[in-house]
Amino acid sequence: MPGDALRREFYMDDAVTAARKLLGAVLVHDSPLGLTAGRIVETEAYAGQGDAACHSHKMAAPIAGHRTSVMFGPGGFVYVYLIYGMYNCFNVVTNRPGEPEAVLIRALEPTRGLELMMERRGTDDVKKLCGGPGKLCIALGITRELYGADLCGERIFIEEGESPPDGSILATKRINVSYSGEAADYPYRFVIRGSGFLSTRRFVGFKPI
């Protein structure tokens, strides 16, 4: 059964705390073509101005028209950006206004709207539908048109889910942030150990937290 939608206060935590707490919750997109949803099994925290891997690194204030503008507002809003000129990435803005942090949702376990997801992705392999940031955006129909959307609304939101069992959350290095110096080694990626829906098995040998 669907859980209650997360309230604003949930998103006011710092990105690292929120990234851990989001595991097991369910991302829902109610699009004109139908409703799709998936349990969050992999996240990455991007911890603001002091995190060299974060888009808001060293930004003292928002810049008009810049893609990071939404990050400077309150938590609970959508930050979607394009990578490689072709794939969208879905992020949850976290923390208080003026603290530009976000959590990248890296992988989902599909739970609702599987037929629509399969049509969008062109595959009937459930484990491949949402195993990566770009893949899950295609599967759920998430585009940059949702930039700035309120996660406390009815169009796109996150429901409470089943919390991962004790000892099943792993903290690892983030993926593809080698450009960020020492920040590349921050253990800001969180995964549910044993999930068959992760984007990659890299670093999953790290100890549970």
Image (tube, helix red, strand yellow):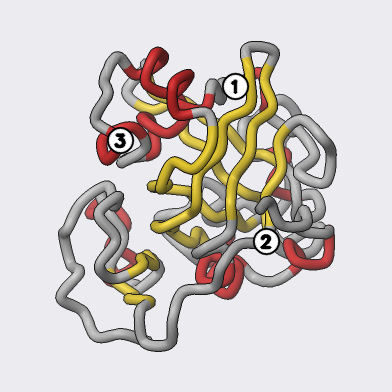
The numbered dot on residue 160 is: 2
Decide if residue 72 is on the left or right side of residue 137.
Answer: right
* Residue kind at label 1, given as amino acid type: Arg
Residue located 84% across and 39% down the image: 153
Q: Secondary structure at mark 2?
A: loop
Task: Say which residue label 3 marks.
Answer: 126
* Residue kind at label 2, given as amino acid type: Glu
Front disc: 1 or 2: 2
Q: Are marks 1 and 2 in contact (CB under 8 Å)?
A: no
Decide if residue 66 is on the left or right side of residue 36.
Answer: right
**Residue closest to the eye, 114 or 209:** 114
Task: Say which residue label 1 marks.
Answer: 144
Q: Position of residue 48 (x, y in %)?
A: 58, 60
Decide if residue 163 is on the left or right side of residue 60.
Answer: left
Q: Secondary structure at mark 1?
A: helix
Tell me how far mark 1 sits from mark 2, CA to CA. Answer: 25 Å
Q: Position of residue 107 (x, y in %)?
A: 39, 47
Q: Position of residue 52 (x, y in %)?
A: 42, 59
